[in-house]
Image (cartoon, rainbow, N blue to C red):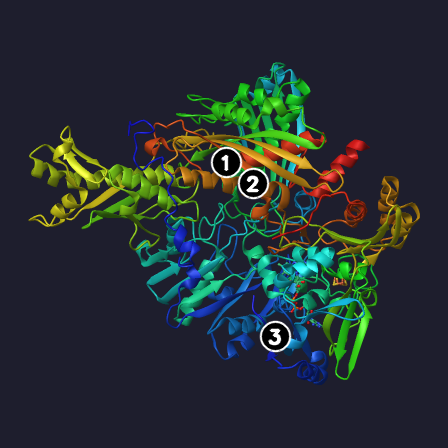
Amino acid sequence: MAKKAGHYTVVGTRQPRLDGALKASGRAEFTDDVVLPGMLRGKIVRSPIPSGKILNIDTSKAERLPGVRAVITYKDTNGLMSGSDKFLLCENMVHFFGDEVAAVAAVDEDTALEAAELIAVDYEPLPPLLSMEEAMAAQAPALHDFMTDNIADEVTMSFGDPDQAFAESDYIREDEFSVQPTHSAFSEHHIVLADFSLPDRLTVWTPIQSSAIIKSSMASNLGLTDSSVRIVNLHTGGAFCGRGGDKPHHYIAALLSRKAGRPVKIMCTADEEFLVYRGGGKYKFKLRTGVKKDGTLMVMDADLVHDCGAYMETQFILLRFVGSNMQALYKMNASRYLGKLIYTNNPPYFFHHGAGLVAMRFAIDSQLNLIAGELGIDPVDFRFKNAVEKGYITPAKFTYASCGLKECITKAARKAGWKKKYGKLPAYRGIGIGCGMLRSGGKGMYDHDNSSVFIKLEEAGKAALFTGLPDMGQGSHTTMAIIAAETLGIRIEDIKVVAGDTDVTPYDVGAISQRGTFTTGNATINAALDAKRQLAKTAAEKFGVKPAVIIFQDRKVYPKGSPEKAVSFEDIVYATLHSDEGRYVMGRGFYNPPSGQSDMSKYEANTALAYSFGAQIAEVEVDPETGMVKLLRMTVAHDVGRAINVLGVEGQLDGQVFSGMGQTLFEECVMEGGQVLNPSLLDYKLPRPFEVPEIERIIVETSDPYGPFGAKEVGQGPIQCTSQAIANAVSNAIGVPIKELPITPERVLKAIREKAG
Amino acid sequence: MRLPRFEYVRPQALEEALSVLAQSGSRAKILAGGTDLLVNMKQRTVCPEVLVSIKTLSELLMVSSDAQGFTAIGSGANLTDLAANAGIAEKFPAFIQAVRAIASKHIRNMACIGGNVCLDTRCWYYNQSKLWRDARERCHRTGGSVCHAIKGAARCHAINSSDTAPVLVALDAKISVMKKGENRLIPARQFYCDDGIRNTILEPSAIVTAIHLPDGNGAGRSAFIKLSMRRGIDFALCSIAARANINGAGVTDVRLVLGSIASMPIVLEKAAQVIMEAGLTQSAIEKAGEVARTELGIITNLFTSAGYKRQLAGVLVKQALNELKGKTAKRGGAKA
Ligand SMILES: Cc1cc2nc3c(=O)[nH]c(=O)nc-3n(C[C@H](O)[C@H](O)[C@H](O)COP(=O)(O)OP(=O)(O)OC[C@H]3O[C@@H](n4cnc5c(N)ncnc54)[C@H](O)[C@@H]3O)c2cc1C
Ligand code: SF4
């Protein structure tokens, strides 16, 4: 793949998404579109209190209701756990408002709802622990009986010699930052259709980021072999890190189906969406940073406490991810990190937009601005001075084979007119910069990071690409089609993507940790090369040359140096398929990045091969009377390695700015008494397209040596820069540091007032 | 979410609708566009046994000018149609601005003006699913004796968030209300009550048939401004409707009405007095903004604190007065 940009025919073009027309015309099939014969509807009975004992569950009335086919409680679950600390259905304790207690399946949704309401549960409420402070207080009771306190997990990491580095610093600053809980607000609700009517065969239709994770988890938890479980993942309406794997509703549907002997569909209602998945929990960072007078960054020491809610889910990963990524953006000599996950009786939280990194980057980059201010250094220069570069190895041993951070900073600053604007804008207008980085795939979730792809060739010179990588809207299927078309020397119209059925599609860890383009992209190249080898044999026979000299280009096949002899790709495919032996062409490709394995004692390893980087500059206007902030303009520079699909990259940049703006200025799960006070899309203030600012996009291509055609990621990478860019701009506009997200009008007004005294 | 069971009645004529309502009493609810009522039913805050659909009654679809100098708009008028009605927009710009600020295009496609005028009040405890409400003690409105939104309140202070309500009050509109054997024309200001539970004078068997807007006198100016977190699909954090007659430097008939801040539109008497005495001078406008904040009474916090709402009220008063004066003010208005 040594070609330079511009030498490609499909890579680097602007391709509309393969699923675009389907979705726009309402033809795309989602899980709720699947209706099976005899299918039942399930409903989950949830705890109406944040903490308490279950005294009694009476299901008799529900069972007698005509139309009810199955009722399950803890007794039917065989002690099944959902995660490390949660019974699938509560046994004798409930730990959050919404905790799953029982479930029913009935012939239709109304009957299921009625039956769910007929299940009488007696509770003895207990005083809930609603904040991290309450939960960490010395006298606080342990929320879970297998624990002695409420610290669900604790991690310390130390790189280099932090004490020495602080001692050598000329200036040390300490600040606290907090980020309020958020929600992902998927357009497609949580939904599952499970058919477990035969004891040794479970089929699950559900939107998911990783069919692999849910398949193996469900198989092992339900005592099935891996091959007895089939996961069908149709189109997926959004994920934003929140649909990683199996969740309680998946198991509940399976158990109901097994008991009723019929397929069962459970779709969470709009209000349940704020119970089953909560997005990111509350973060509190205490950050201490040391620098030299000239602005050289020396050391950072961070304490993070994170509210994981009633159950830990996968937040222990987040805890480690934050610590090992802390020193990955700016060079420094040393760092120290203490992260704690705190159990509370709030709903269990989950990943949202890059597993805690958004919150961490907001804290770090906001503090760096304060430091720059005190040292009298321009924030752009400050970042440029400390930015990581190609070849740099971070204290946690991340190794940057490509890195465009400095280029992103410089280009964004130039395009945004930073020099003309910074410090020179009228009152209540502000400009701010934020930077970020994210790895492209890598190990950690498993000890491998496998992707595999099949490419089957069909008579008309067309190819079907089989992948287990889901497309949740990020456009990865289009990206794979481009990579396959480029490698096979055909066009994107010649490729169809078959995805999302584990009985048919090959193994893939899935669309997590920004691994799609990088990892599955490499597997796609390998599959296409394998298919080409098979075709080259036919072509070589035809031209009387060695297979190695056969060229595939623009739907033509010819021996190297003799393009006049070219025959069509279609003819070669036909000739192969109809050869005397009936050679069937199926390219097979796989890829497992030869990256390191994280050492759990030191947390040092280059767990990924590629990392993306970005810089964003926000311009805002603040209304000093209402506190409302208008994001006027965002300049976005992102090092994607190579833009496989320019249109797709632009879409991701825009989408991330939009989501990032939402998280920064609008979105907050307002919590009280363990309940979200605004659990609807009306009251949880997601922005709308009207709020989208003017976006200037700069695509930086550093051609990563390991990436397919040099590509890295443009998944959740860009959003790693957004919050701090906006926060720094607001801070610049009002002259007050911003230390809490989201920056609501009320908080802005309060800040302005406090400054005025 | 699912609707509870109910009986659906679609009368062919207004008279028949009035009869059905007279018979069913409080078991029935009037269904216009349903964009508010059906959501409330799904959340089980109201569970009527009978829904009487009035959306297609031809008697409620008329728009006409009468001899008394009023323009009558039938309560069944669809909001998208109204928003596009150039004639009404020219005569009553503030009213049409309010209509255009309601919810979103999709919702306006379904909704009627009568439904907006009669919109139920809202609060963060009440407008939730049943499961959600069940986690808390019952309040004045749900059969208990506390208020969650304002701790210690002796009655319900749920908020009237109708965008057109303050405009109707500001413009001195009249609301025509019919029940079997009775037809009344009620000034908008008397139509609304300062009670979160029963926030209009309507009896269950009565229908709002039309709203009557007084045609202007040439010197009248009006304004409507809505502040919300986002453009569209958002209730106001606070809104204002303002009106004044301006003859040279003289300013008479000043009316300032706040919406979405209490159980009924709040008429700011003192702030208006400031302007009538001093005219639309910059200092009077500043003063009116300050004065307004003192005459607000109890404010319910709906995701923002009462103090913040008080601040917005003052800001809106100033913005509206500036707009009346002819300056272009910043609009938080929603066009979606
Ligand atoms: C997401 C969302 C956003 C919204 N945003 C806004 C907003 O920004 N501003 C706003 O003002 N509203 C908003 N609404 C509320 C509502 O959509 C509008 O107020 C709409 O105009 C209601 O009209 P409707 O015809 O749908 O009323 P319906 O829902 O049919 O009725 C509302 C109430 O009025 C009663 N009623 C209706 N017609 C009559 C009549 N002729 N006589 C007597 N009683 C009657 C009904 O019984 C019911 O109690 C929003 C709603 C949603 C779901
Ligand atoms: S304002 Fe108070 S009394 Fe009224 S519905 Fe809300 S909580 Fe209940």
**Chain on which label 1 sits:** A
**Rendered image quadrant of residue B173:** bottom right
* Mark sitting on residue A718: 1
A680 or B140, nearer to the observer = A680
The tag earlier along the polypeptide, 2 or 1, is 2
B196 or A82, nearer to the observer = B196
Asked if the residue at tag 1 contacts the one at tag 2, i.e. Cβ–Cβ closer than 8 Å, the answer is: yes
Q: Are marks 3 and 2 on the same chain?
A: no
Residue A153, position as x, y percentages in the image? 55, 41
Amino acid type indicated by mark 3: Thr
Q: Quarter containing ligand 1?
A: bottom right
At x 79%, y 57%, the residue is: B150
Determine crowd level at label 2: few under 14, some 14-19, many 20+ residues with C-alpha closer than 10 A: many
At x 75%, y 60%, the residue is: B159
Q: Tell me the residue that label 2 is attached to.
A: A660
Q: Is residue A238 visible?
A: yes
Q: Which mark is nearer the camera, 1 or 3?
A: 3
Q: Which mark is nearer the camera, 3 or 2?
A: 3
Q: Tell me the residue that label 3 is attached to.
A: B56
Quarter the N terminus of chain A occupies = top left
Q: Does residue A145 lie above or below A265 as drawn?
A: above
Residue A205, position as x, y percentages in the image? 39, 59
A475 or A279, nearer to the observer = A475
A114 or A622, nearer to the observer = A622
Residue B76, position as x, y percentages in the image? 66, 70
**Chain on which label 2 sits:** A
